[in-house]
Amino acid sequence: MKELILEAWANRELLKDSKYSDAVKAVIEEVDKGNLRSASPSDPSTGTQDGWVVNEWVKQAILLYFGLQQMQTWETGPFEFYDKMLLKKNFAELGVRSLPGSVARYGSYIAKNVVLMPSFVNIGAYVDEGTMVDTWATVGSCAQIGKGVHLSGGVGIGGVLEPLQASPVIVEDGCFIGSRCIVVEGVIVEKEAVLGANVVLTQSTKIIDVSGPSPKEMKGRVPARSVVIPGSYTKKFPAGEYGVGCALIIGQRKPSTDLKTSLNDALRDFNVSV
């Protein structure tokens, strides 16, 4: 399938041939089932940076699929929708709890024991077992969400289809993402990290570890088991000095802390309330 997708990507006229269009549809079906992913954990022996590999050809297939699909109308009670993409079905068979108002597009993978509150999961996304996607949270295209993650109310996990080499947002197993957090531009949140409410993370956001005697600055990645809150630092501009948003690592989750702890419990260890 990969070779057919690469050929069709180079020459869209090939999609008129059912061999190629069927290959695109087959890839989306495998993404929908979780057998293919737009990004996947790398083999530790390869030494790949960040521990993840972006599968560009899968993202190409998703973009080609948009071109193949025709617009159509759906009606549900008083609501009407007009779009190209089908929606996921058979949540009972999948073992997924889906509340009224939750929307997951066909081509997203929703694993067993996931709870979807009124929320949105886009095509290409991967949501692993036991994760909670809380009210008004969004999981963007190709985002990778691990096992046992809690995406709190209003969380925005960014999507990415283009550029093809761009990494999607990755939230690893056991993370707690607080209310109204925004994580975009391929930021990686490592295992069991806790983001306090309103933390905003982009590739240019400074992530400053202030838990030691001197600050340590990083970007694009939150270390495993970190407890993070919103912060700011002063930056000089031609018009004067102003506060610029950043994220502060105030410590690590303690071994005694239960992995399913609430956000308040995790922050209470550091006498912080957000």
Image: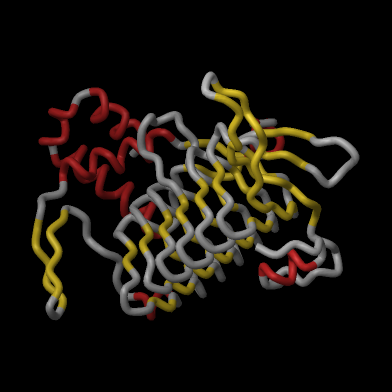
Residue 27 pos. (x, y %): 33, 47
Q: Along the line of sight, which residue is nearer the eye, 151 or 59?
A: 151
Left or right of 212? Residue 247 is left
Residue 214 pos. (x, y %): 86, 36
Residue 232 pos. (x, y %): 64, 41
Location of the N terminus by quadrant is: top left
Q: Residue furthest front?
A: 239
Q: Is residue 178 above or below residue 208?
A: below
Name the residue: 41% across, 45% down.
159
Its colouring scheme is secondary structure
Please tell me in which quadrant of the rendered image residue 53 appears: top right
Q: Along the line of sight, which residue is nearer the eye, 107 or 193?
A: 193
Name the residue: 35% across, 55% down.
122
Residue 98 pos. (x, y %): 39, 76
Left or right of 225? Residue 121 is left
Q: Along the line of sight, which residue is nearer the eye, 108 or 178?
A: 178
Q: Residue furthest right?
A: 213
Q: Along the line of sight, which residue is nearer the eye, 250 or 43?
A: 250
Q: Is residue 129 above or below residue 216?
A: below
Location of the C terminus by quadrant is: bottom right
Q: Is residue 40 above or below residue 197?
A: above
**How many labels were placed on the picture?**
0
Please tell me in which quadrant of the rendered image residue 139 appears: bottom left
Left or right of 99? Residue 15 is left
Name the residue: 32% across, 35% down.
60
Name the residue: 80% across, 52% down.
251
